[in-house]
Amino acid sequence: MGQAIAGHADYNNDQIEHAQLLDEPPETLSLGRYVVSSSFGRAVMENWQSEYLQFFLFILATVWLLQRGSPEYKELDKAGTESEQDQMIGEHATPDSPGWARIGGIRTWLFSNSLLLVMGAIFLGSWFAHSVTRWSAYNADQIGISRSR
């Protein structure tokens, strides 16, 4: 909500300043129209892109430290990944273990890395959405420039 309100005010101020320079009436937007505009989408996607990149890198660093035997997470004699027997997966799984733990292979790898994969996918999605909204805002600006000439 804060980004919508502040962005709306900033957008309309820019429109008023631009109109004053060209000596034309300003083309301001209502809050509802601004929230569905490419300018608002670009701002939101820009924020999400940076946030999800931070989440992705934080998870990656945490996993790396955990697997390297960081003293905050594991004892020094237990550095590295645990064995399948310690994790009770693959042939060491119990009958009441979930299916992914009994089967192993790609399913176990996907489950073991699911949080990192999801955050990476969300980051890539927000990057793509930011690119599309930025392109749309650029095109809208170009149309506005060509109208004022």
Image (spheres, rainbow, N blue to C red):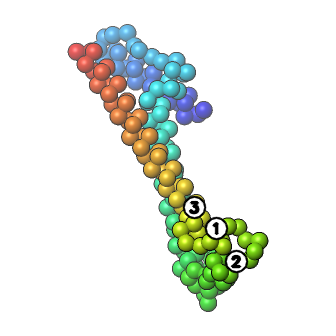
Residue type at mark 2? Ala
The percent position of residue 67, horizontal first and vertical second, equals: 55, 77
Q: How many marks?
A: 3
Q: Position of residue 15 (x, y in %)?
A: 40, 20
Residue behind mark 2: 93
Q: Residue at x 52, y 27 (%)?
A: 35
Q: Which amino acid does the dot numbered 3 rest on?
A: Ser
Q: Pointer 1: what residue?
A: 100
Drawn side of residue 34 relative to residue 95, left or right:
left
Label 2 SS: loop
Q: Of 9 and 78, which appears nearest the observer?
A: 78
Q: Is residue 90 left or right of residue 57?
A: right
Image quarter of the C terminus: top left
Of labels 2 and 3, the one closer to you: 2
Q: Is residue 59 visible from the viewing direction of this image?
A: no
Residue located 54% across and 34% down the image: 3
* Relative height, residue 80 to residue 58 (above, below): below
Which residue lies under the disc numbered 3?
Answer: 114
First in sequence, mark 2 or 1: give its number.
2
Looking at the rendering, in which quadrant would you find the N terminus? top right
Relative vertical location of residue 52 with respect to residue 43 in this rendering, above or below: below
**x, y (%) of residue 96?**
77, 71
Crowding at mark 1 (Cα within 10 Å: few <14, some 14-19, many 20+): some
Q: What is the C-alpha distance between the residues marked 2 and 1?
A: 10 Å
Q: CA distance from mark 2 to mark 3?
A: 20 Å
Q: CA distance from mark 3 to mark 1?
A: 12 Å
Residue in view at x 58 percent, y 33 percent: 2
Left or right position of 48 against 130: right
**The residue under label 1 is which amino acid type?**
Trp
Mark 2 crowd level (few <14, some 14–19, many ≥20, 10 Å Cα) = many
From the viewer's side, name the closer residue of 132 and 95.
95
Q: Nearer the viewer, mark 3 or mark 1?
A: 1
